[in-house]
Image (cartoon, rainbow, N blue to C red):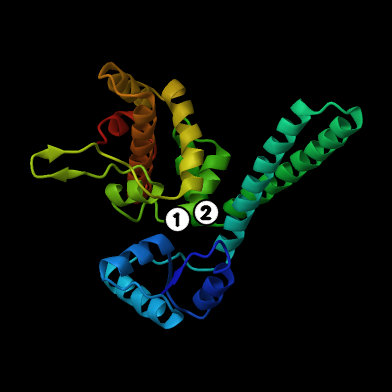
Amino acid sequence: MIVVEATGGYERQLVVDLMTAGYQVSVVNPRQVRDFARALNILAKTDRIDAAVLARFAERGQPIPREKAGRIEELRQLVIRRRQLIEHRTAEKNRCAQGVSPFVRKNILRHIDVINKDVKAIDKALVSLVQSDDDWKNKFDKITEVTGFGPQTATTLVAELPELGKVNRQQAAALVGVAPFNRDSGQFKGRRMVWGGRQSVRNVLYMAALSAMKHNPVIREFAARLHAKGKPPKVVITACIRKLVVILNAILKTNQPWQPRLAAATP
């Protein structure tokens, strides 16, 4: 297996080429690799040293390999492009609200209309691409059965969290960045903290959790219990995201439909 660091997207073509050639490839967080080097007291940094550290990191950490290259990269790029357009549209709406010049406002509104058309086109392409693959379609259908998850959230999970259903619940929560980590030492019991994870996935799950807390009876009751215990709102939302991730992971792993009764018993 070949392990490379994430470089803001510049690694994508290399990953696709390697996987097309038949190699298993894993893309890892460069911060984790640098922390690993510091733990080994390797403070110098050259390409040769970095390559050796990366090899040792891969041997010790056994990172999860990427799914087979091909259309999954096309799906990821469509999801990323849609997210970029949504962010751009939000910025334009903010500018429009502050605009004074009629010409500027008209120009911004015209630009927003173009973005809306582009988003609709990407949505159509995403649905078509997901429906063309049996595995993706099955995942998409299973995810959207759960109250709180819409098509865009489901598509994002298919594209950017392909490990879902293939790992255990702790690993799934850690990949999203909602797994609480202990901070204990001797008699000291520190506050549990979440850390790391894939921000883009966490962002869409945040909105899904807010919806589920209102409309999904399992998540609504779970959130109510946490509120009754006096948990802060952010802790409640994070816990709801984690429960949703664990539920989805179990559904995809067992290939079973959404069953609220069983989901309520999920830890």
Q: Position of residue 138 (x, y in %)?
A: 48, 49
* Amino acid residing under circle 1: Pro
Q: Position of residue 136 (x, y in %)?
A: 51, 53
Res. 203 mark: none
The residue shown at (52%, 50%) is 137
Q: Secondary structure at mark 2?
A: helix
Left or right for 71, reference 225: right
Left or right for 81, reference 238: right
Q: CA distance from mark 2 to mark 1?
A: 6 Å
State yes or no: discs 2 and 1 in contact (Cβ < 8 Å).
yes
Quadrant for the N terminus, please: bottom left
| Res 250 quadrant in image | top left
- Tally the marks: 2
Q: Position of residue 204 (x, y in %)?
A: 51, 40
The residue most toward the top is: 228
Quickly name the residue at label 2. 159
Q: Is residue 256 visible?
A: no
Quickly name the residue at label 1. 162
Which residue is at the front of the view, 36 or 220? Answer: 36
The residue shown at (35%, 26%) is 218
The residue shown at (50%, 53%) is 160
